[in-house]
Image (tube, coloured by chain):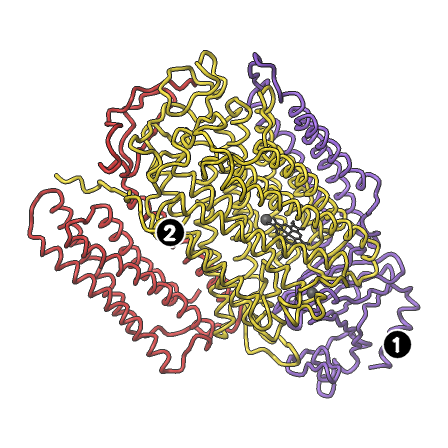
Amino acid sequence: MATVVHEPPKMDVDRLPSQGSGNGGWRNLVPASGGLRKVQDASPPPASTGIWVALASITMTFAAFTSALVVRQGGAPDWQHMTLPPILYLNTVVIIGSSFTLEIARRRIAAFMGGLHEHADKPLRWLYITLSLGLLFVAGQILAWRELVSQGLRFATNISYSFFYVLTIAHALHVSGGLGGLVRVISKFNNRTLKRSTLDATSRYWHFMGVLWVYLLVLLWMKL
Amino acid sequence: MAKLLAVTIVVIAIASAIPIVMHIWPLPQDISVNGHLIDEQYTDTMWEAGVSFLASQILLAYFIWKYSRPAPNATVKRFPGGAAALVIAAFVLVGTEALALGVFGAKAWGLAYFAPPGADAMPVQVQAGQFAFYFRYPGPDGKFGPLHANLISEANANFFGLDTTNDQDSKDDIVTAELAIPVNREIHLLMHSKDLGHSFYVPGLRVHQDFVPGLDLSIHFTATKIGRYEIVCTQLCGLGHYNMKAYLEVKSPEDFDAWLKQQAALQ
Amino acid sequence: MHDMSAHAVHHGAPTSFIRKHIFSLDHKVIGKQYYALALVAVVVGMVLSWLMRLHLGFANFAIPGLHLLSKNGAPGDIMTPEYYLQLMTMHGTIMVFFVLTTAPFAAFGNFFLPIQTGAEDMPFPHFNMMSFWVTFTGFLFLVASFFVSDGPTLGGWTQYAPLSAVGAVSGPGQGTGVVLWAFSIAFFCVGQLFGSLNFITTTLDMRCKGMSLMRLPLSAWAWFITSIMGLTAFAVLMPAVILLILDHVAGTSFFVSSNLVINDQVLPHSGGSTLLWQHLFWFFGHPEVYIAIIPGMGIVSHILITNMRRPMLSHRVLIYSMGALAVLSYMVYGHHMFVSGMNPVSSLAFSFPTLVITIPSTIIVLIWLGSLYGSKLRINTASLFGLGFISMFISGGVSGFFLAQPSIDILLHATYFVVGHFHLVMAVAAIFGIFGGTYFWFPKMTGRMMNESLGKLHFWLTFVGAYLIFMPFHYLGIAGNVRRYQAFVDDYLIPLIPVHKFITVAALATGAVQLIFIYNLIYSRFWGAPAPDNPWQGTSLEWSTATPPPHNNFGDKMPVVYHDPYQYSVEGASSDFIMQTSPEPVHSADEEK
Ligand code: HEM
Ligand SMILES: [Cu+2]
Ligand SMILES: [Cu+2]
């Protein structure tokens, strides 16, 4: 199908890049039949696409760990199913709670950005609460590891412990990345440079960490 | 320059095919019952792959020859039938070719791996370890004694870790460093590894199977030609890997019996 | 209302040397850094292949000075068997990871993907910078293993467990060497994940006005598809090497089974699965070979179409076929494991998708040939390498028919046939893609032209040389010559020694020819003729900006795209090509219906 030349876009092509052209580009679903204008629109900000890409890759990594666990647990008689340290259940409550507090903060900031004024410090408070809960979660995980180690249950004690440590440490490292993201959101919020897409991406990541944790907990608890 | 390239491509294509057509370096001679199926499959594939190879190289060369240096007023021409024709051609030609190869090739694979060994197949055990193979025959009782990893000792020549004092079945087991088998008798080879990954490859027998640490595998085959052949390890297993080999001795039944007796006496 | 989604990624042009050339955020600088890394790596890898070949052809030949590299590995300058295996492992690892993944994908992709999509930069420049430096760290880890006491690992680039997992007892280099190897690969994975994240987001979100996905050049499509594969494949390899490291240093038993005995000692591991490593590795490993070759396909399509002065016979079919390769590549990985001891039913199950994958590969070749038909082919170094790529890809591809069938694989597995196959289809073809890309884009990257006469000389000697080296590998394999051997002690291999000698001579000569390329690269970089903005009369966006492109790629005017990418020889147009940015109204020459 012949592609007809489209009329020049309405946007000012002569504007300087410093005026914000690099905001990502365009969602150019140019159909062969023309009709450029109808379907042409600014792309979503890269952060909101990028976060899904990043989460997809994290999912693949944990899927690989999972398949290793399934093969290893199913294939060999030496698997001694472990009892999870009880503190993990408390940590679960903490990380799920932090998702709620972050969501409260996110909604307030979003409303604030939308011009429906509110006091800026209230969302900030919720952000700090989320950050503290996140730190609490990591601290709780460290306590869990120490508890196991103090009982002499180490990395190589049994393969089930190996998986426990690998999965929880990998998850905790990812959570720490999320904590870094929260700190960044807070500092940008204070500088008034916070972008909606940064906020949304960070909170999606954070929620994902919560979901991932629940998944890992079930995976480690369940006897296949 | 383009014409030179076209000629070069054709020359290379033909020159590459010559050693194959002339069988300058043939497949190792087949000494097995089922190997001919693999060889036929190989030959069929060689025909199809060879024709595809020559045809596409020559076509490439021809187009390069023909369409470089066009006259200044030349216009571009469209391939008759366009992309659709090519896509259909690829599906029909290559699709059927690939499917046919896959379906017919499955038979040779099935005989090697799905068909169980015959009831009268002779069991022999092989153990691979850095960097040697050892073989074990069950002896007159027809039973292999159990293995004890902690008893393995190169120094005492207890390669398998047998406990010949306590295990009744181990007492008459015969351990050798070469694999002797009677001709035209099916062998059921029970494979395990002592340490790492290794492989059991006898090109003439058309047998190739990796050893998997922690997994007992088995293969079966029948040799049809008396002679001495090499068994090589093809799984990288350490510094002595290149030197990890043993011999397969295919003997007449009488020779084999004599050999086995002699080995039994050496235990 | 604030437009909170306004998202400025651009950054001012840096002024300090460090920000400009070392820790640069500019995708173009990062692309060049990747190219430089690949160049260093390929020289190391090639020298290693010389040493290997010398040894295979002339086993007792003393290589002067080799003992300086390793006293134990080459006493009296003569290579020991274990040192051969160590060098081979380094050769394979360096080539696959640090050459074939970095050069066509990370280097050219970084430089040209944002330009071809009409973006100012990648969306996450800090991640992009880290991507390079993390990868570079990985390279340092790998190189460092040459200098540890017992040298680099000897386990091969596939690093099969348990050889790789049980530690120094299993051989030289299996202690520290393996750990360095595994860390190197883990770093590499992280680097490529960051890179893929940027590539995908750039393609989806950073396109300029008018640039629909189907208007992206084939090279951009190839990078996009490759980055999706990279995102999934490296995300699986990384956990696998982490588990490997743990088996190694923490004494876990992911991959090491019970009751293994080395030196009469029972190893302390229990219950691990050898095949688990192979499954994880090849789930990455097969897509990896497509990660190596798909960018080459894209680059070569881009080069050839420019030099054929016509649109591709079908843009879409080519894109869909590359996509099909990417998808299928995850379903065929078991063809590396036919005789590994996995369930023989799985072997058959893996053989069918492997045979099916020949269909999209054939379609790609046929589309190239069909586009060549009736074209106005221009011969220059870049297009010569493009044509050479097609020839190599065909030659390497047909041997896939053999290896795809488990029954024939019984004969050919782990022989030199495999070595011949993957060198032609992956190594040489991809290297031709890199060479072609270099001759084609060098002017845009540096502002200077490369020397065409030297380039053509380089092509001819390399093209013939590569065939002389890699075709005979197939004959060796057919005769049953096993790979990863340092010497041919087996009687049945002795008749093949002359072939090995021949290959060695060809490899040394072809390797030496690469000096022409390196000379040309360095000479042209400093003294080459100044390049115009559009030396090849191309149509895509990289040719519509200055040479070399300014810091934000397009200066003050962001491009607006009006056309499909390859509008050559359009009837009624004012010249034989119409730039994507040209508002000239014409009927598309895209032959797609
Ligand atoms: C200068 C040209 C080259 C020569 C002469 C050469 C030669 C060799 C040789 C002799 C082997 C050892 C085969 C064996 O013993 O199993 C080998 C292995 C290998 N080569 Fe090359 N090679 C060259 C270029 C390349 C390139 C460009 C690549 C990029 C992909 C590459 C990738 C590999 C890989 C992946 C292996 C397998 C290593 C292993 O088994 O772990 N080679 N090469
Ligand atoms: Cu071996
Ligand atoms: Cu593969």
* Secondary element at image label 2: helix
Q: Is residue A216 above or below residue C406?
A: below
Q: Which residue is mark 1?
A: B261
Q: Position of residue C391 (x, y in %)?
A: 65, 35
In the rendered structure, the colour chosen for chain C is yellow
Residue B10 shows in this picture: yes
Q: Is residue A78 left or right of residue B218?
A: left
Q: Colour of chain B?
A: purple
Of discs 2 and 1, which sits in the foreground?
2
Q: Which residue is mark 2?
A: C129
| Amino acid on which the number 2 mark rests in the picture | Met
Q: Chain of mark 2?
A: C
Left or right: where B220 falls relative to A164 = right
Q: Is residue B64 above or below residue C442?
A: above
Task: Work out which quarter of the rendered image holds the N terminus of chain A and state it.
Answer: top left
| Number of numbered tags placed on the structure image | 2
- Amino acid type, callout 1: Lys
User: Is the CB atom of the residue marked by disc 2 within 8 angstroms of ligand 1's nearest atom?
Assistant: no
Residue B77, relative to residue C198: is it above or below? above
Horizontal side of residue C588 vs C321, given as left or right: left
Which chain is home to disc 1? B
Residue C251 lies, in percent from the top left, at: 50, 75
Q: Colour of chain A?
A: red
Q: The C terminus of chain A lies in which quarter of the figure? A: bottom left
Residue at x-position 64% and y-position 47%: C423
Q: How many other residues sit within 10 Å of disc 2, few (<14), some (14-19) or many (≥20)?
A: many
Q: Residue at x 24, y 64 (%)?
A: A134
Q: Which residue appears at 73% of the width and 52% of the height?
A: C504
- Tell which quarter ligand 2 is in: bottom right
